[in-house]
Amino acid sequence: MSHSYYNKQWAEAQATLTDLLQQEQPLEPPKPERDRLAAFQLLATMYIKYIQIFRRLEQSYDQIVHPQKRRVLRHVLDGVMGRILELKHEMVNLEFSEYHYFDDVLSDLKLTPNDVEIPIPKYFIMERLKPLKEREKVLGQILAKIGPQDLEKDKEDILMPFEEAIRLIQIHERARQGRLRAKFMREIRQQEAREKILSTKVAPTLDRDIAAMRIQKVWKGFAQRRKTKREREEEMIFIGMSPPPMPASMKINEQTLALKTEESRRRLQEQNEQEYQQALITIKDKIHEAEGPDIKETMMDQIRQWFIECRDATGKFPEYPDEDDGGSAVIFAKKTPEELEKELKEKEDGKEKKGKGDKKGKKDKKGKKEKKEKKGKKGKKGKGDDEDEEEGWKMNPSEFVPAIDEGTSTYKGVWQTRDESDNFSQKHDSELIKEEKRKEVEAEIRLQVDELMRNELKNLKIAVDRDKGGKKGKKSGKKKKKKKKSGKKGKKGKKKEKDLTPDRTIEDLYEELVSQGIIVRTPQVKLSDFEGEYSYLGTTLRQANVEPMPSLSDVRRLVTDFAILPLGSAACHESAPLTKSILLAGPRGTGKKLLVHAICHETGANLFDLSPANIAGKYPGKDGLKMFMHLIFKVGRALQPTVFYIGECEKMFKKKIPKTDPTDPKRLKKELPKALKTIKSDDRLLLVGTSRCPFDAEMKALIGCYNRIILIPRPDYASRHLLWRSLIMKNGGVISNMLDVSSLSKVTDGYTPGHMVTAIQQVLTDRRIQQLAKKPLQAVEFIAPLARIDPIYKEEEESFKAWYSKTPLGKKRAKAAQGDDDDGGGGKDKKGKKGKKGKKGKKGKKGKKKK
């Protein structure tokens, strides 16, 4: 694509974003929404529109090469990303569920599920490519040192008894001899068959015309069958019942050419960025040399003029503003000398007086009293019968809308109408750099001028006082000394936690954790590898009061919202609702560990394996546990983003643990929740736990440790159909008309993606792949390996449903559903919950019925 294409795409995204901002920032405050369904429709529509804008902005930011445009784009992109996360949390609080279904909204907007798939920004990895490569190199070097020891241990474990080894050799030797004997007998039979055919052969007696007609019949039949088969395949492809043929060489070349173009644009980005950084230095130096002396002289003349004006207006020389107040920049504000003198006096009086703190305390107390009175009034209103005064749902104020608005205004003011016909190569704009750097040069020169003019003002005052015979004390020095003391107190207050390893570097601690097996290398797994079809009947089932099971596509969206986007962007993590921990719960083979690896790979995060089996016997005792927690959080904060992974996390919160278990899974039960409380918005740390049977753990302790619960179900029919096709293609198979994928998907109900992969790997051996041209795959071949695997039965799925209904969100959703059935969706507070008013109203109705 060209520069103009991505500029046009950015312009379209900004136009849509402007319309959304007008909707989010109305002139009059919106009325509270009492209908929960209408509120969700509003949120879902905004959520989908923001995702569409996000898709365009992400692609534009990845491919636009202009360095100054990319800075504005990045500001808007982070704002839109954060707004998506805010809307997601709003929907969770409104519907009391992590899963949401937008099939009705998509049909209204005439969109497909692919149009609202959340992309993972490529800059998460691209902008940290060099540090990530260095980290991978260091990790490889450390693992290379430890490798031989682990290999020797593995060899010791693999040793088998002498008798079993002899028996295994005998079996293989007998099989080899049997194959040779069978081959020899086959050759003998083939030779005998050839001799019989030769003995029965007779000279041809057919006429030439008859022979020609027979040849024509055979050829015409073959040609017609081939033509019919081709037409049937084209028709099946046209109606979508068969996949398109394998891409031709020309198509592959087009795809590779597009990828090469994207890579070349990224290299051009790096070149333009280097030139831009160099231009920032050179242009600033030029402005300093060329315009610096003139700026200095004009500033000094203006300040001297101000001295004279203040002297004429007030009869004395003014007090020079401090650096904290802005220095001489305050002088150039549009104020008269008298107003400026009054402001400076008020500031000095405010510093000397101590009564301001008491006034603030009184104001806070008054504010609290007013809030209590307002709450009391609201409670009284709830007791009455005035339904018009009820409060409904209101959207919380956004932290990201101001940032989006700022970036949009910058785009409109600078780039929307800018003529770039001469800038074909999309290099930096030097005029914009001059405007920015001129301000920086003025600020630097002002500091120098302030020092000179303070001394000059001091000398003027001394000269005037000498004439009058008066003396003035030095106040400025005392003030500065007081300010220094306050800074020291602030530094003392920050030191709360003790550093148990003050003499050791982060590199040393990192090496220790890698050697202990705590920091693990993550495989190259993308989130797109977790495949699954969209749920097309979610809203329909919910309208029929049936809670649908989420699809794998919904799971992928949740992982993107709660884990990948906050971890990848520091700006989003600081202001978006904080998610400290996630629990991935689901049956075996549903892809829980694959999701953990995808989170680390997509964000470039370090993976700390804190599973009970992995940390067993490491850092023993109470002191060892303290040191262990200190190490993982110190290294995790230094090398963020970081993911702490705990496999089989339900064991940590079990009531009874078998005595034969040597892993001591309850070791982190007390320390881990305490450490999670210390995570702040600046720390891009995330705890991810996986569990096959979360119902074995205590609910309160488990929910207290994990903020968000993502339930991963067994795949439905649509997901199984998609998985069979993609997994067979990835493992070297070919989808043909002989392979009935639809029947295979129907028969394999209850089997997870892990089971499918196992069956495909057993069927598609190297020898079978070589035979695909002559012998196409059939669905029957996968039944035998699947029959040896136990599927996930409905009883196990129901147990997961029952457990999820006992979680806090599950209980709230059940209550909300009852409220909707009883009241028709009325009596909700700001968060969509049933308020106290609704409950009191019900009590009142019951009382009337009794009367």
Image (cartoon, helix red, strand yellow):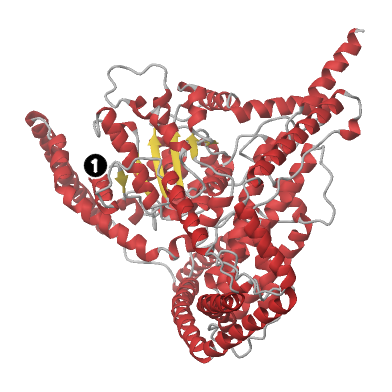
Q: Residue 345 in the image: x percent, y percent?
A: 67, 62
Is residue 88 shown above or below 422?
above
Q: Residue 442 in the image: x percent, y percent?
A: 56, 80
Q: Quadrant of residue 802?
A: top right
Count of number-bearing discs = 1
In which quadrant is the N terminus drawn? bottom right
SS class, disc 1: loop
The residue labelled by disc 1 is 516
Say whether residue 378 is left or right of residue 319.
Answer: right
In which quadrant is the C terminus drawn? top right
Q: Nearest the camera: 67 or 455?
A: 455
Q: Nearest the camera: 822 or 453?
A: 453
Q: Residue 705 in the image: x percent, y percent?
A: 48, 31
Say whether residue 584 is left or right of residue 731.
Answer: right
Q: Residues within 10 Å of mark 1 (few under 14, many from 20)?
A: some
Q: Is residue 255 visible?
A: yes
Say whether residue 119 is left or right of residue 590.
Answer: right
Q: Nearest the camera: 635 or 59?
A: 635
Q: Residue 359 in the image: x percent, y percent?
A: 69, 43
